Amino acid sequence: MPDVHAGSYKEAILFLVTAGVVVPLFHRLRISPVLGFIGAGALLGPFGLGRFSDQFHWVSLFTIGNRTEIAHLAEFGVIFLMFMIGVELSWERLRTLRRLVFGLGSIQVICSALIIGSILFGLKVPLAGAVIVGIALALSSTAVVLPVLAEQRRLNTPAGRASFAVLLFQDLAVAPVLFAIAVSGRSDGADMGGALALALAQAAIALVVIVVAGRLALRPLFHLVARTKSAELFMAACLLVIVATALTAAASGLSMTLGAFVAGLLLAETEYRRAIEATIDPFKGLLLGVFFVSVGMNLDPAQLLAAPGAILGLAFALLFIKAAVVVMAAPALKLSRAVAFETAMLLGPGGEFAFVLIGGAMATGLVPEPVGGAALIVTTVTMIMIPGLATLGRRIGKRASKHQQGRVRADPPPDKQQDRVIVAGYGRVGRQVGEMLARHKIPYLALDADAARVAEQRRLGKPVYFGDSSNTELLRRCDIATARALVVTLDNPHAVEAVVVAARAERADLTIVARARDATHATALYELGVDDAVPETIEASLQLSEAVLVDVGVPMGLVIASIHERRDEYRAMLKRKETDTRPVFRARRTVGKAQEGPREASPKDEPATVVRRA
């Protein structure tokens, strides 16, 4: 057995300890964990406690010294982020937000980059370096802004939608900029045209290979994996696709992040999109934590202390330039002044891709070290300000007049189907529910764990996605926060209860309608918080009664009236039973335990067909 030295794992252990402390602490303080990771990197890095490791040997036990190992993990954080951006991108979302994405987004990036780049070029920075730094500083922080908006429940406000649209355009702009830096870095200036043509041809071939192979192989691969019903194998397939496409892109001279982004786009239109998002999101969060720790490690407090006025002055100058561009562009896009100011506060700071772009440009010699280092320090300082600026922008937004607020609410939401109904289970019952919703023009999204069924329904054009409906993260990816209702049609009683528990824990005011096996199961579901429970056995008996009464000659109107009357009687009986047996059901509830089957209904347990919450 090889000799294992504990120091080999010191960086990994320190990061896990940091994550275990930072994430819960900052969540409790309602501060973005990103700031905690940056602060931890500054504290544990070579410019923090690492300064004293030579004088005090024991200090080295608590510092991150292997920056190369951290850098490799940090790169994967950005790779996973770009993959998730590709997966979350949809043509419907782009079409709905096209005015803000390509209007406000392009104006913000182009104008901010031109102003910043012109200032740098006037300060004798080389043209290529001025352009790259200008573009890098024009970008904002998707990794910080969106979680802050989500925590404040402001993603669906006018300012939240405008911020999301601009961030989406910025994310799209990163890929070509990374490619341009890679091409410029490989050329020696002697034959720029030839190097560019060769690089473009090589990149085009690589992209064609990735796209063609992806379209031919990805859907069958995930279909095969999903049929095994193994969560571990599905996770392995997701990781394989990300790493394989990233390495293929890197081997062809492109960036690994661009390869991961293309892979995400290929998977965005498949039925496995939601399940992939739920599977990869924890990896993305953890690896992005490593990325922000590496960002903090490059922050030298001595530089801040040496010239605090200059750094803060540059930081506020950056905020002013980017905010002014957004405010001045807002009237052309029919955004109110209050919304423009709130959006400007969110988009003014720098973002995580500045570290990627400027770091890559510094490595190829396109950006001088002093200029790049100063830009990265300014970016870090402004990112730390985001939560405070978001609060300030929210206060400014509250001053909007009722007329302005009403006008901006008329803008299209990020997703036309944000008020859709979620259908958990798309078997025979789920399909009937979906058809009735479609008949009444109510948008819906269905989830099912049967890969073959999902593939079949997708071919028919149905909005069905693969995944476990009881997965909280998957429900979030299906926008349960803005869902109109949840209909649970699964035929397994324990699976139904698990979905109800997960959904009710995520959103207390959501309307939940669930399929029940019998009276006992319906009462248990009511205890778990459903609004309506529909016992299938009693509904079948009532429909049989209706059919036979009509067939023997009873007028249809009388039959329908008597069926409704009988339902009301069942409802009243079951409500009394719920009151009498509520403690019993609390004691016997065993959600998700497959070893215990549902109790069979006794003759005296006749339930109401629909159990409505009192």
Image (cartoon, helix red, strand yellow):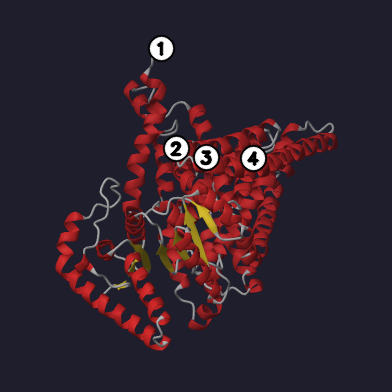
Q: Secondary structure at mark 4?
A: helix
Coordinates of residue 16 in the picture (x, y in percent):
37, 35
Give the residue drawn at x 67%, y 62%.
102
Q: Nearer the viewer, residue 334 or 130?
A: 334
Distance from the alpha carbon under mark 4 to that under mark 2: 20 Å
Residue 489 visible at all? yes
- Crowd tier of the residue under label 1, counting other residues whose Cα lies within 10 Å: few below 14, some 14–19, many 20 or above: few
Q: Residue 67 in the image: state x and y as whole percent.
A: 49, 29
Residue drawn at x 41%, y 30% is 12
In the rendered image, which residue does mark 4 sit on?
Answer: 217
Give the class, few, some or many, for how many residues have Cα within 10 Å of label 3's Cα (few <14, many ≥20): some
The residue wearing badge 3 is 225
Any part of residue 291 in sight: no
Mark identifier at residue 181: none
| Number of marks drawn | 4
- Res 461 quadrant in image: bottom right
Give me the disc on residue 2. 1
Secondary structure of the residue carrying tag 2 is helix
Residue extending farthest to the front is 552
Left or right, 500 with respect to 156, comes to left
CA gap between label 4 and label 3 equals 12 Å
Label 1 or label 2, whichever comes before in sequence order: 1
Mark with earlier residue (4, 2): 4
Q: Amino acid at mark 4?
A: Ala
196 sits left or right of 447 in the view: right
Q: Which residue type carries mark 3?
A: Val
Q: Secondary structure at mark 3?
A: helix
Identify the residue under disc 2.
232
Residue at 67% x, 53% y: name it: 113
Dot placed on the residue nearer the N-terminal end, 3 or 1: 1
Q: First in sequence, mark 1 or 4: give its number.
A: 1
- Image quadrant holding the N terminus, namely top left
